[in-house]
């Protein structure tokens, strides 16, 4: 079982027509996207997060339930609103974000019991919470307890510039979790942010790097390999990295506790590449997640 912990929010995806911009509401939040992807790809998964007692929060809980997710660990905060992320897309489907996140619900994350951590094989930690010092300690406590129980911790950098005071404070907060995690995921741009030298120094971890149209790369114990992806015409790249991460983790979870062989890592990235690429062919991080049959059709072609 995989346990995803972190932000759940509404992506407000903008589109301009005839000089008027309209926004379409979609469920989002990187760890929630990953959790939904894992569920869609056949993994057992639970999600821990926090929404406000407002119409966006109620929409997200309904959405999660309709998707087939267990909603018992989604906390409803009566004092705070649900986070919003406004998303604008260019002609290639690449996106830029603007977060409405000032003392919103995901600043006040629900507690995670030892029993819940013990029930999981892999614990995935979200990154948006790292903008708050108290939430950094919250994340580190979960990581420490997970490791004490012999669990694997996964972390996606998913760096968003507009929620941190500056690059230096962001990198400082991220490095605390990166130092403790077992599986870490970077985008190509994030490798530049943290520097190739730093990423190369993470030799005791499985490092996954998404390379856009060039596919992805894994690095582990001095070994590495780049895996190409399929060619698609992207509509919306929101959540593509989350779909990739969910796909890769779904493969790795089946071999939890086993050897991280080159063959296993290649298989995980091939699956993740296809999942991420296909996810860009529709709008929304979750609504366009491909099903297993479609992924396998591409893998076997």
Image: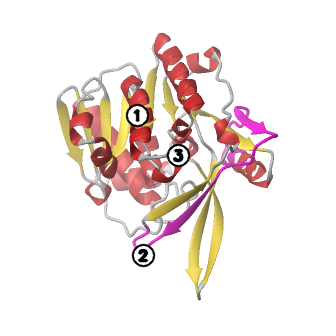
Q: Are marks 2 and 3 in contact (CB under 8 Å)?
A: no
Foreground label between 3 and 1: 1
Q: Which mark is residue 91?
A: 2
Q: Which of the pair 4/13 is nearer the observer?
A: 13
* Residue 144 to residue 51: above or below: above
What crowding class fits label 1: few (fewer than 14 Cα within 10 Å), some (14-19), or many (20 or more)?
few
The quarter of the image holding the N terminus is top right
Foreground label between 2 and 1: 1
Question: Sequence-wise, which precedes: disc 2 or disc 3?
Answer: 3
User: Percent x, y for residue 198?
Assistant: 25, 35
What crowding class fits label 3: few (fewer than 14 Cα within 10 Å), some (14-19), or many (20 or more)?
many
Q: Secondary structure beneath disc 3?
A: helix
The residue positioned 44% from the left and 72% from the top of the image is 90
Q: Which of the pair 37/212 is nearer the observer?
A: 212
* Residue 249 within the segment the image draws in magenta: no
Q: Can you identify the residue that label 1 sits on?
A: 172
Q: Secondary structure beneath disc 2?
A: loop
What segment carries the magenta color? Answer: 64-93
* Residue 140 to residue 250: above or below: above
**Would you say 98 lies left or right of 168 here?**
right
Q: Can you identify the residue that label 3 sits on?
A: 30
User: Percent x, y for residue 209?
Assistant: 31, 44
Q: Are marks 2 and 1 in contact (CB under 8 Å)?
A: no
Q: Secondary structure beneath disc 1?
A: helix
């Amino acid at each position: 079982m995989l346990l995803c912990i972190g932000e759940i929010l509404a992506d407000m995806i903008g589109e301009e027509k005839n000089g008027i911009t309209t926004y379409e509401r979609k469920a989002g939040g990187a760890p929630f996207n990953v959790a939904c992807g894992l569920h869609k790809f056949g993994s057992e998964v639970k999600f821990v997060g926090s929404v406000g007692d407002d119409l966006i929060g109620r929409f997200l809980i309904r959405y999660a339930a309709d998707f087939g997710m267990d909603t018992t660990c989604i906390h409803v905060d009566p004092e705070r609103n649900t986070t919003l992320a406004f998303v604008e897309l260019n002609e290639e489907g690449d996106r830029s974000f603007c977060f409405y996140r000032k003392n919103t619900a995901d600043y006040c994350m629900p507690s995670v019991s030892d029993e819940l951590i013990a029930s999981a094989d892999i614990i995935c930690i979200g990154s948006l919470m790292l903008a708050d010092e108290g939430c950094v300690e919250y994340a580190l406590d979960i990581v420490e307890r997970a490791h004490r129980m012999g669990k694997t911790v996964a972390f996606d950098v998913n760096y968003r510039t507009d929620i941190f005071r500056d690059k230096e404070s962001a990198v400082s907060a991220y490095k605390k979790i990166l130092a403790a995690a077992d599986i870490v995921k970077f985008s190509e741009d994030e490798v530049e942010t943290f520097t190739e030298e730093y990423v190369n120094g993470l030799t005791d971890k499985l490092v996954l790097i998404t390379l856009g149209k060039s596919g992805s790369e894994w690095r582990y114990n001095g070994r590495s390999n780049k895996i190409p992806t399929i060619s698609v015409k992207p509509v919306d790249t929101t959540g593509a990295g989350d779909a990739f991460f969910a796909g890769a983790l779904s493969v790795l979870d089946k071999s939890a506790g086993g050897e991280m062989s080159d063959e296993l890592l290649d298989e995980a990235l091939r699956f993740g590449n296809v999942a991420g690429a296909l996810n860009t062919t529709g709008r929304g991080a979750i609504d366009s997640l491909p099903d297993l049959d479609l992924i396998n059709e591409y893998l076997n072609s």
